[in-house]
Amino acid sequence: MKVLFLCVHNAGRSQMALGWFEHLAGPEHEALSGGSEPADDLNPAAVQAMAEVGIDITAQRPRRWTTEDLERVDLVVTMGCGDTCPYVPGTRYEDWPLDDPRGQPIEVVRRVRDEIEARVRALLADD
């Protein structure tokens, strides 16, 4: 399975999803993340929340999704980017309605992190 996780800023939700996916998936799976309007840096609260569960996402950098990303994945998971997320006919899509952790206290970010973990686990179980 090849997955592309998309959100607006590629600084919180999609980066946490990528972190969980890489942590939980086997080598036969691949994931990417991107944003429609990438931030300059990762959300520090997202970095902290992931570090609390032993996952280091500090090497990741927010980036814009590319056409090449879309062409190489089996599934696109969108998280709050609405019409700014690309649509490719014939590609499987899932929308995860998650709160944006941007500017939220760590307690909210932890809840989003845990919801993302459950969704990534379910995604991998269905594969």
Image: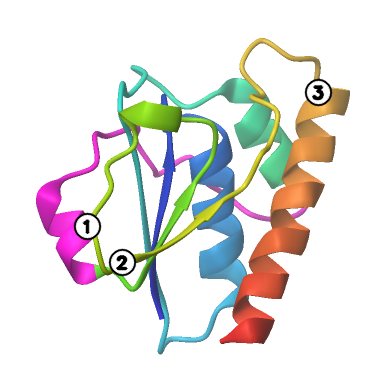
Horizontal relation, residue 10 to residue 88: left or right: right
User: Relative to 45, is 2 above or below?
Assistant: below
**Quarter of the C terminus within the rendering:** bottom right
Q: Amino acid at mark 1?
A: Leu
Q: Amino acid at mark 2?
A: Thr
Q: Name the front one of labels 1 and 2.
A: 2
Report if residue 8 lies within the magenta region. no
* Residue shown at 31% from the left, 66% from the top: 91
Q: Give the residue number, with chain letter if any, for mark 2.
A: 91
* Residue shown at 41% from the left, 81% from the top: 1
Q: Contact (CB < 8 A) between labels 3 and 1? A: no
Q: Amino acid at mark 3?
A: Ile
Q: Earlier in the sequence, mark 1 or mark 2?
A: 1
Where are the magenta residues, as a range?
Answer: 53-72
* Most foreground residue, 115 or 16: 115
Percent coordinates x, y for residue 58 in the rendering: 48, 40
Q: Give the residue number, with chain letter if any, for mark 1.
A: 70
Q: Earlier in the sequence, mark 3 or mark 1?
A: 1
Percent coordinates x, y for residue 24 in the rendering: 62, 74
* Residue shown at 57% from the left, 38% from the top: 13
Q: Give the residue number, with chain letter if any, for mark 3.
A: 106
Q: Name the front one of labels 3 and 1.
A: 1
User: Relative to 120, is 6 above or below?
Assistant: above
